[in-house]
Amino acid sequence: MSDSPIVLLLSGVNLAILGERQPEVYGTDTLDDHVERARAAADAAGLALEHVQTNHEGELVDAILGARGRCAAIVINPGAFTHYAWSLHDALAAFEGPVVELHLSNPSSREPWRHTSVVAPVAAGTIAGFGGLGYELAIAAVERLLTPPS
Ligand code: DQA
């Protein structure tokens, strides 16, 4: 077993159908494509990547709670849960490592109901609007956040 720090990448509701889902908004890459991008970036940074996708809010909460004391950081694209799932906020608040919020699109430039994120207050930062590149940027952010200042 590798002893590299583990980054937990969480994908929420409706992200399993990326590639087919509104390609004009989310692009044509599949979720697997994005995960592989994140994994390659994590490998290069000496980090191990675990990925969980679920359409169920409680399963995301379980994954977050299961990361406590085990994972070094969380990258989360909650999908529409972003905008109302306070249970994710509370679970992430109980996680001791850095959290990076990630979106393919830029919710701030879309419908008003997407402008609120319940995850943002417990995230170190948000990466949004860069499509698949965001997955690499999120790992770069985690790498930096896990590196103690010299
Ligand atoms: C999303 C943005 C959300 O508003 C939306 O509900 C999604 C995807 C994104 O990655 O751009 O499902 O999180």
Image: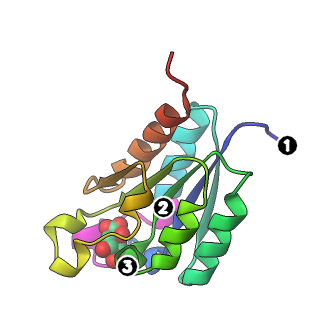
Label 2, label 3: how far apart the Cα atoms are = 12 Å
Residue at image point 72% right, 64% down: 66
Where is residue 37 shown, x and y percent of the image?
48, 48
User: From which residue to which does the magenta span run?
Assistant: 20-33
Residue at image point 48% right, 61% down: 76
Q: Residues within 10 Å of mark 3 (few under 14, many from 20)?
A: some
Discs 2/1, front: 2
Of labels 2 and 1, earlier in sequence is 1
Label 1 residue SS: loop
Identity, as a three-letter code, of the amino acid under mark 2? Ile
The answer to whether the residue bearing label 2 lies less than 8 angstroms from the nearest atom of ligand 1 is no
Query: Where does label 2 land, which residue?
Result: 76
Query: Would residue 86 appear left or right of 72 to someone viewing this image?
Result: left
Residue at image point 67% right, 73% down: 62
Where is residue 104 shown, x and y percent of the image?
32, 61
Residue 135 vs residue 65, the one in the foreground: 65
- Look at the picture and state if 26 lies above or below 21: above
Residue 36 vs residue 76, the one in the foreground: 76
Residue 136 sits inside the magenta stretch: no
On the rendering, which quadrant does ligand 1 occupy? bottom left
Where is residue 108 shown, x and y percent of the image?
19, 65
Proximity of marks 2 and 3: CB atoms separated by less than 8 Å = no
Extreme residue in the right direction: 1
The answer to whether the residue bearing label 3 lies less than 8 angstroms from the nearest atom of ligand 1 is yes
Of labels 1 and 3, earlier in sequence is 1
Q: Quadrant where the N terminus lies? A: top right
Query: Where does label 1 land, which residue?
Result: 1
Query: Would residue 38 appear left or right of 113 to someone viewing this image?
Result: right
* Badge number at residue 80: 3
